[in-house]
Image (tube, rainbow, N blue to C red):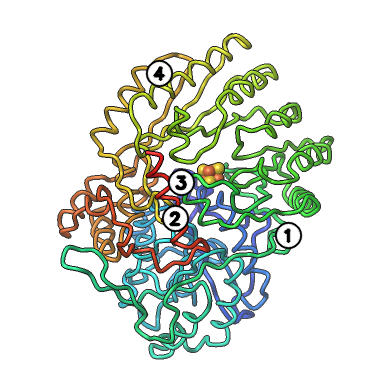
Amino acid sequence: MFSKEILLSLHKPARYINQELNTYHRDLKEVKLTFCLAYPDIYEVGMSNLGFRIIYDLINQDQEVLCERTFLPWSDLEDYMRKNNVPLFSLESNIPLYNFDILGISIQTEFNYTGILNLLNLGKIPILSIERNKNYPLVIAGGSSCFNPEPLADFIDLFVIGEGEEIILEIIKICKNRKKQIKDREGRQELLIELAHLEGVYVPKLYSVDYENYGKIKRFYALDSALPQRIKKRIVSDLDNAYFPTKTVVPYIKIIHDRIGIEIMRGCPHNCRFCQARTIYYPKRERSIEKIIELANKNFLSSGYEEIALLSLSSLDHSEIKKIFPTLTQFFKNKGVSISLSSLRVNQVMMDLLKEFQGMRRVGLTFAPEAGSERLRKIINKNIDIELLFKIAEEIFKFGWRGLKLYFMIGLPEENYKDIEEIVKIVYEILAIMKKRNGTGTIRLSFNSFIPKPHTPFQWLPMENTDILKEKINYLKDKLRNKMIKYHFSPLQEDWLEALLSRGDRKLCKVILKAWEKGARLDGWREQFNFLAWEEAVKETGINPDFYIYRKRELKEILPWDFIDVGIEKEKFVIDYQNFEKLS
Ligand code: SF4
């Protein structure tokens, strides 16, 4: 689409060319439906998302559908496109977004919200759902950030709540049969009503919200009593038989996760009170060792990648992990392929597996104690034996690793400076072990601010005040000053935005729109993050961010996301919240 001259003037032009190995190309004349799968961030981020890859491959198994990908351009190409009136188009066939029947957007983080608006606008599709007529695609969205869809209610026609591979073909089947209705105003409304009866589908314009004078929700309701009052998350019941690609798309440029990713387990058996991922991917389901080997081998043969990452929220909790890891390592031993494991846990299985890890690429091993003191770990329900972490560190350094990485959170409920001091002690203890064993190395630390996320037992709590967080960060920076320690703190302005958007309701649509109008774009990229645009957007729309971020909510309050049924009853969160209160 772009001339060589233009491409060569851009940063990383390979983001914008197509024909990567294992992509799909189909004749437009031979299909019944066109589907553009969009990621509201740049290519390297979108192509690193496993869910995005699964859906792309799955839809393309249907020969009657043409499914192509699109990503946001970096600012240099965006400037060129706007100046020259070039619409955003799909990678494979360069079809402008407005010409597709369906635009399916994958939403994985709140930092993509303005990216969604930018994607629609660059694709020459009206941003507001009510302004889209029959000439435009049906705009649907799914992904882990759709578990509180309300801040995006004005922009999206239909949300998929839950696991996309379980439902997307049902939506496509209905749309194929009702293709004429997509392109007809009255018919489209009928189509949306029909789709809204599918389990896991939420059509915001078919629901309404009443507010009390001071902004709390009084009532959330379906406009038609025949529609479901609550939207039940769709889940894959049998992971072994769930669709998973056997061909990995191989990009021309290095992407964030540049390897084969095989999901070995979905869900997590633990119940950390701050953790939203546990709820989103609930319940725990395992893929069998036979299936894992089959998928790993097929993807290896079709791509030539030399690294296979075994993925899950907590890989050591797979009941067969002690067998899976050595079996795969052995299987790929003479093929020059390394196996890596994500999301490790401090437990006996880790201790037992350490010897096997010797063949693993020397990528950093990462653990997440999250809190410094035993007391605080009990409060957040993160059960980790710190003495065992020290033993694991001993072994890791003995086997030649040059460092490790630890994740902590600050601003946790009931946190005090004694808890923070315990973080410092843990870090220096591990540093001492590393020095004793290797003499050198690096301890990497990542600190995130605690954000009380929807669908967790902590969802009623306020976030810690920014000034207090700043003090804690300064304290830690001062105490952790050492050339063998490297730390990163999540920027507080970004945390503020994440808290606002993740805990918001429909009233935030106007803030997101205003922030985008003021230039907010790729919010997940530090160099592009425009905090001023957000500050002004909040002010000009009259929204009080403190109402969403710093207000303790009552247990009886109707929360904006209560109508989403995640598979865990709200009552269970209430009980767990009360258990937390007893501890504090
Ligand atoms: S923080 Fe990790 S271990 Fe805890 S529930 Fe979430 S995924 Fe599981």
Q: Which of 26 and 152 is in front in this view?
A: 152
Query: The C terminus is located in which quarter?
Result: top left
- How far separated are the C-alphas under marks 4 and 3? 27 Å
Percent x, y of residue 312: 62, 47
124 shown above or below 403:
below
Which kind of residue does numbered mark 3 sit on?
Arg
Contact, mark 3 vs mark 1 (Cβ under 8 Å): no
Image point 68% across, 37% down: which residue?
A: 340
Give how far across and how far down residue 74 sits, in percent: 41, 49
For disc 1, the marked residue is 240
Asked whether mark 4 and ligand 1 are closer than 8 Å, the reply comes as no
Category of crowding for the residue at label 4, using alpha-carbon neighbours closer than 10 angstroms: few (below 14), some (14–19), many (at least 20):
some
Q: Distance between the residues labelled 3 and 1?
A: 29 Å
Q: Element under label 1?
A: helix
- The location of residue 514, given as percent across then percent down, is 23, 59
Q: Distance between the residues labelled 3 and 2?
A: 9 Å
Label 3 Cα neighbours within 10 Å, binned few <14 / some 14-19 / many ≥20: many
Determine whether, in the image, residue 293 is placed left or right of residue 344. Answer: right
Q: How far apart are marks 2 and 1 (CA)?
A: 30 Å
User: Counting residues from the N terminus, which is met first, the one under dot 4 or under dot 3?
Assistant: 3
Residue marked by disc 4: 480
**What residue does disc 2 label?**
573
- 365 or 548, which is in the foreground? 548
Amino acid tagged 1: Asp
Nearest-to-viewer mark from 4 and 3? 3
Q: Quadrant of residue 509?
A: bottom left
Question: Residue at label 3?
Answer: 273
- Which of pointers 2 and 1 indicates the residue nearer the eye? 2
Say whether residue 96 is visible. no
- Number of marks present in the image shown: 4
The earlier-in-sequence mark between 2 and 4 is: 4
